[in-house]
Image: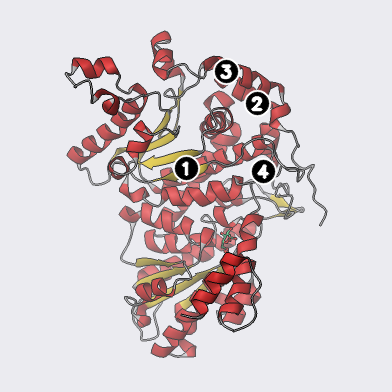
Amino acid sequence: MKIKSKILVNKNPKKLESWKKLEIHFNKIKNIQIKEYFKKNPKRALEMSCSWKGFFLDYSKNRIDEKGMSFLKELAKEADLSIAIKKYFNGEKINSTENRSVLHTALRNFSDKPIFIDGKDIMPEIENVRTKIKNFSKKIISGEWKGFSGKPITHVVNVGIGGSDLGPLMVTEALTFYKNHLKPLFISNIDGDHVREVIKDCPAETTLFIIVSKTFTTQETISNAKRIKKWFLENSSEESIPKHFVAVSTNISKAIEFGIHKENIFPMKDWVGGRFSLWSSVGLISSLAIGYKNFEDLLIGAGEMDSHFRNSPLDNNIPVILSLISIWYNNFYEAESEAIIPYSEYLKSFPSYLQQASMESNGKHVDRNGKPVDYQTGTLIWGATGTNAQHAFFQLIHQGTKLIPTDFIGFKNSLYDEIDHQNKLISNFFAQTEALMVGKNKNNLKSEGVSKELIPFKTFEGNKPSNTLLIEKLTPYNLGALISMYEHKIFTQGILWNINSFDQWGVELGKVLANKVLDELQSKSKINHDQSTNQLINFYRNS
Ligand code: F6P
């Protein structure tokens, strides 16, 4: 395949004027304390904040000044970010190594504007699929759709992995408050114990299985689906399959071959990457669990964030600002990771969802020309909910030796009006960002009467950076906007790093080797790996 690497410009960011300015500026300001910036500029908090609808972002607690921010914005301009954004939304084939458009954004387009791929408007098909999801959701939720014994569906199991699991799982869990009577469950890992644990509590007569696989060839999903089908047939018969198995895939023939009724296949398109697919039919389980109306609100929120990203100037563009700050730490401070801390238990799967979205996208070692990069790309993403995280790994963020820029995400209003809890939750949320920045020095400790010996242990260096995102309330609309915000942060980073954020060749080698090893585990054939792998295979075979 000939790679059309010219679709997006190819500029090594290190060679850009703005990068050079950033290097010089970094050396000037790298040791300045964030506290000092606040002392100098009483308007810093206001100036380094922006809001959009129910979102308020305060990025003033970062190790950067106005000049640094303006050089970063120059970088975005020099890297032709605005042209890249146009190409992205207009459906140009910016995924050059797979010759594909990247149009998950079309799935949340509710304007009457057409979107073309190869001259064909894709909106009518998107609308048909939305209607299919809506009608199906209605039938399942209302109980009109019956299982083989005539009873309505009670349990829905999503069988998929990676993007066919993490997105719908995170969304369904995050919107639990809006959930109906259906019990959503997820099977992802090839781990047979996991499969058995989930199906053990599923009544075959009232369970619906959604087999979600873009390719319908993924080992984990297909093996799990086959195992589940076998279990189902022990409790029922072939004729009952259409009442209990539906599929989401681009590979219609493979889904039919598996035994899914043609009518029960929800199509996907190759211009939707797995990790960006929760907006497509892949989100079916979310629509079933929270109802189509809420699912559509999620799409609408994401679509409105798309408009914010496309149309806002850099100064006020939330995804762009977040990505520039992230590049600042990654490429100048050489920070290796970023923590994501949502102060909402509903968002407990948000960090792992973002791990795939970000690390599968931007974990790349070559640029858009296929040349090795001479700068750092994708950051490590990790995190957990606050306040739990405070009692687990915050020690390292506060007093460890690593620089870990952290995104704090919180909601102004709780869903159950638990005012006392909400105030405590939010006070922790704000206090952590303050403590990280302010720290505690020798003098503070002395004046508190702390003994000399203990002072080094009780000292907090401070100057730990964070972004604070405060959102009105956890609604489907705001969740959609939040996810879309991070998708565009990831996109912007990929553009500035001059990499292709939309392929994932790095997951292939392990898949191929696993198949080879599987054959060897199941036979006594001669093996020819490295010493360590040979030893492990022999150990397993002889057990
Ligand atoms: O192995 C990585 C990956 O290709 C992801 O990008 C994708 O989300 C996942 O596998 C699942 O793929 P599929 O939906 O085709 O089963």
Inspect this view and state whether residue 178 appears.
Answer: yes
Q: Which residue is mark 3?
A: 27
**How far across and down, in percent of the image, does residue 291 sit?**
40, 60
CA distance separating discs 4 and 3: 35 Å
Secondary structure of the residue carrying tag 2 is: helix
Disc 4 under 8 Å from ligand 1? The reply is no
Q: Amino acid at mark 2?
A: Leu
- Please determine whether, in this image, residue 224 is positioned above or below residue 68: below
Q: Is residue 534 above or below residue 36?
A: below
Q: Residues at badges 1 and 3 in contact (C-beta under 8 Å)? A: no
Q: CA distance from mark 4 to mark 2?
A: 19 Å
Q: Are marks 1 and 2 in contact (CB under 8 Å)?
A: no
* Ligand 1 quadrant assignment: bottom right
For the residue labelled by badge 4, is the local secondary structure a helix, a strand or a loop? helix
Q: CA distance from mark 2 to mark 3?
A: 17 Å
Q: Nearer the viewer, mark 1 or mark 2?
A: 2
Q: Position of residue 434 (x, y in %)?
A: 32, 25
